[in-house]
Image (cartoon, rainbow, N blue to C red):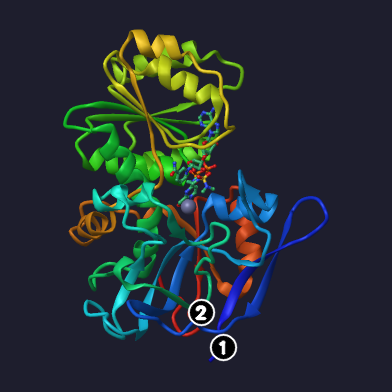
Amino acid sequence: MENLSVVLYKRREEKPKCDIVLENRPIKEPGEGEVVIRMHSVGICGSDVHYWINGRIGDFVVDDPMVIGHEASGTVEKCGKNVSHLKPGDRVAIEPGYPLVNDDFSKSGRYNLSPVYFCATPPDHGNLQRFYTHNADYCFKLPDNVTFEEGALIEPLSVGIHACRRAGIDLGQKVLICGAGPIGLVSLIIAKAMGAASVVITDLFENRLEKAKELGADFTIQIVRGESPQDTAKRIEKVLGGMPDRTIECTGAESAIQTGIYATKSGGCLLLVGMGPEKVSVPLVNAAVREVDIKGVFRYCNTWPTAISMLASGQINVKPLVTHRFPIEKSQEAFEHTRDSKGIKVMLKCDPNDQNP
Ligand code: NAD
Ligand code: 572
Ligand code: ZN
């Protein structure tokens, strides 16, 4: 059976450091506890584009050809031995990371902190292909009223759920979100669903802030390059009518992290979701003397069942996040769209017989 796959190949010249190659690859037979999935929808993430353009993220280098893609959903085609909760024909959302060892993190439920297999993080292959074989325990059955694209969006949504859980978002809170890219926007959706009373979101670009308003942001602030973080923090306090109890930083930009510290209310909490340079200069003493807790976020754990319930019940609407769709054959064009920040989420359609949402 044909298995068209989108593969990054390292090249010698400067940028981009990888070529996007469409090729036919063998379908991996399902081992014990695995399922083969007929892929339907795969979203493009900023990290996929980063691997294409730079050939690496930090220490994770695309040395060998790597299938790209990790925001995915599809239909079970075949089950390996000892798979009891899924059967061929089931529609599933794929959690791309699963622990490889049963260590203390894994046993206590924080399996994101264990050594993991993670789709499209070298050396692990992703799932932007017609057929992909995955650990069945990390494939979650989708109810009939949840679309494949919503299923694929559970992956970025999970980052927002995990960040808001770690932030302790609660009823009536004021919340600041820095950055209105896909991750800032899913954090906005979840913060509102968890009871935040007023959310302000920042970005450099007006079109991103427009999307944030469409998704329920109470206030938006356009960041002016060169403005001091203290002055930005004052603008944030003014629109919210007080300092934010919680801040979720989704840019990785040094100036936004600085703003996050100055803006957050004493006794509050700042979540670092954005990943920028390894070392940043921040007003740490300002945070310390005001007991502003600073917490990290590494992907997510235990979020797919929550996301599926929220989507199936209509508690949240993520559909407006999808702004572009391309058939898998046009992956190069789709990646160029994400690279050029055209729209928000670009979806690739892997099934030639079903290109629906
Ligand atoms: P993105 O680049 O699409 O969005 C970032 C947004 O921030 C952009 O709209 C940009 O205009 C805006 N921005 C840049 N500088 C700003 C500033 N100084 N103030 C306000 N806004 C500013 O990226 P994304 O897909 O939304 O991801 C956001 C970040 O989250 C990335 O750094 C990504 O690597 C990171 N991420 C982390 C995890 C994790 O596990 N911690 C998981 C997923 C993504
Ligand atoms: O959807 C998962 C995801 N994680 C991202 C970025 C985009 N999408 N992270 C930022 C980069 N890190 S990492 O630790 N790494 C490349 C493994 O620097 C992971 C989380
Ligand atoms: Zn991602």
Mark 1 vs 2: CB contact within 8 A: yes
Residue 130, image x, y percentages: 51, 79
Q: Does 241 appear above or below 336?
A: above
How packed mark 1 is, by other alpha carbons closer than 10 Å (few <14, some 14-19, many 20 or more), is: few
In the image, 115: left or right of 246?
right
Quick one: quadrant of the C terminus?
Answer: bottom left
Nearer to the camera, 294 or 252: 294
Between 163 and 331, the residue placed more toward the observer is 163
**Residue placed under numbered mark 2 in the picture:** 130
Which is nearer the eye, 177 or 94?
94
Mark 1–mark 2 Cα distance, whole angstroms, equals 8 Å
Mark 2 packing: few (<14 Cα in 10 Å), some, or many (20+)? Answer: many
Q: Quadrant of residue 29?
A: bottom left
Where is 36 relative to 53, above or below? below
Picture coordinates of residue 58, whole percent (x, y): 61, 43
Work out whether residue 133 can be spotted. Answer: yes
Q: Residue at x 27, y 70 (%)?
A: 142
Quadrant assignment, res 216? top left
- Tag shown at residue 2: 1
**Helix, strand or loop at mark 2:** loop
In primary-sequence order, the first of circles 1 and 2 is: 1
Amino acid type, mark 2 = Arg
Which residue, as the protein is rendered here, is positioned at the far right? 13
Q: Is mark 1 on a helix, strand or loop?
A: loop
Residue placed farthest to the bottom in the image? 1
Q: Compared to 326, does 12 lie above or below?
A: above
Residue type pointed to by label 1: Glu
Q: Disc 2, ligand 3: is the CB inside 8 Å? A: no
